[in-house]
Image (spheres, coloured by chain):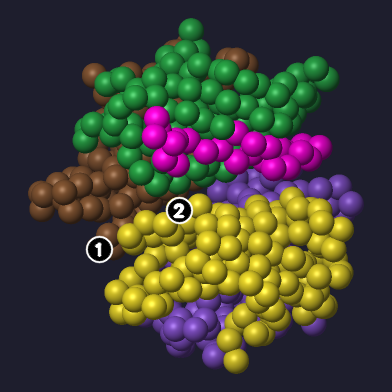
Chain colours: A purple, B yellow, C brown, D green
């Protein structure tokens, strides 16, 4: 079992320029105030960026590894489903940059992330 | 059960200026290459920053909520224990800023994070 | 004279949700390799975010002040004009979040920034 | 003339692990409220990180280029001198990471930055 399975990532689309997923909220994803833990947004964001990058570089035998992740929380989520969309903003030789938006069931943007993925030779 | 319990946070020190914790590595914390998932570093960092802030503002009936989290991964961890130390760098009226270092059993610095916590009236 | 005048900001559009500007490249904006200095991208990004926020909150007598600025450089610019577009991503009571894109004359995206602006009572 | 000269960087120490500089505040460095412009803090931070990296990699004929820069403003500066200290936190093969602190004449920490520098073959 991986970390993505532990917190419940459900990938719905995955290409090298757009990745979508959802994560059902449950008590195990919250912090002491009952809000979804900020680390969940960071984890989802990094997962989507890495998988989108892998969709291309994996075919060349190269590996995608998270380098940096800035997650900004805008509104709390307490229940329902987290909806995440990652869009590629830069495709370099050794780094890819993705923007990720996370929203709630009411389509309110609740967190945004910028994730840089390193592309390495194995 | 909270998210911190799900991934296995073990808090060892907690004051409003310094927080320490450890997280044993297990398969459920890794991504597809067997490395600890970057989201785990982000989650630990945010947890420590929030708890350190709560140590002070909770006494005043105020609430600490994650606002932004930049986690930079330096070296992979694949096994053993993640050791985390958060040091407060700024204590404002509405925001606190923390620096977090995460290292492996060999005391190699493996990730660093800067976390901003918002302090809100309930 | 302000810093925006010193480096040569030319604002072309400014509303509370979209701000555009350009900056002509000259030797005084470069670093030792002849590339535009990363600090120029950061300065432009922060200026646009602050001015867009001020466009709304200034009317209420409130003040917009930069809180955090993550600028990621994607491609170098060495001459011509820097074109910058800032789009608001979040409008909170005390913080606004903007995404900024900076491109060269060939419409290549050369840097992206995420800027958080604090809105304060004077 | 370079951008560092334009805003007035005065380097006082420069090694591959520690760099110090100061910048006298003048009207040309401020924004509309009379505070030092956030872009000045970003520019200083990126300059110090790049110069510290160059101190080592320049000898090998390699080039240091800014990759990402997160600057967080803590307190305003309106006059006097900006004092900046950059400490290296990571020295990788292709990326170096630096933490920068900027303070005022009263030794109050006014901004902090995390800068990642890419090291490239020319």
The residue nearer to you, when weighing B54 against A103, is B54
Magenta segment's dominant SS is strand
Q: For the point 46% across and 86% down, which residue is it? A: A34
Residue placed under numbered mark 2 in the picture = B90
User: Which element type, helix, strand or loop, lies under badge 2?
Assistant: strand
Give yes or no for contact between labels 1 and 2 (Cβ–Cβ under 8 Å): no
Q: Is residue C60 above or below residue B33?
A: above
Crowd band around label 1 with a 10 angstrom C-alpha radius: few (<14), some (14–19), many (20+): few
Q: Is residue A41 above or below residue B113?
A: below
On the same chain, marks 1 and 2? The answer is no
User: Which element type, helix, strand or loop, lies under badge 1?
Assistant: loop
Horizontal arrangement in the rendering, residue B103 relative to residue A37 (left or right): right
Residue placed under numbered mark 1 in the picture = C93
Chain assignment, label 1 = C
Question: Is residue D10 rendered magenta in the image?
Answer: no
Q: For the point 54% across and 90% down, which residue is it? A: A27
Q: Most extreme residue toward the top, as rendered?
A: D1
Quadrant into which the N terminus of chain A falls: bottom right
- Magenta stretch in the rendered image: D86-109
Horizontal arrangement in the rendering, residue D15 relative to residue C16 (left or right): right
Question: Is residue D102 rendered magenta in the image?
Answer: yes
Q: Tell me where residue C103 appears, x and y as whole percent.
A: 47, 33
Q: For the point 76% across and 38% down, which residue is it? A: D91
Q: Is residue D37 visible?
A: yes
């Amino acid at each position: 079992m991986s970390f993505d399975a532990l917190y419940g990532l459900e990938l719905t689309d995955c290409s090298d320029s757009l990745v979508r997923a959802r994560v059902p909220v449950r008590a195990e994803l919250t912090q002491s105030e009952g809000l979804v833990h900020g680390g969940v947004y960071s984890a989802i964001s990094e997962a989507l960026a890495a998988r989108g990058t892998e969709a291309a570089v994996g075919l060349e035998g190269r590996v995608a590894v998270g380098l940096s992740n800035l997650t900004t929380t805008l509104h709390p989520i307490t229940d329902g489903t987290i909806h995440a969309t990652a869009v590629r903003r830069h495709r370099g030789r050794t780094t890819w940059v993705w923007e990720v938006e996370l929203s709630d069931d009411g389509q309110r943007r609740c967190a945004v992330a910028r994730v840089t993925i390193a592309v390495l030779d194995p």
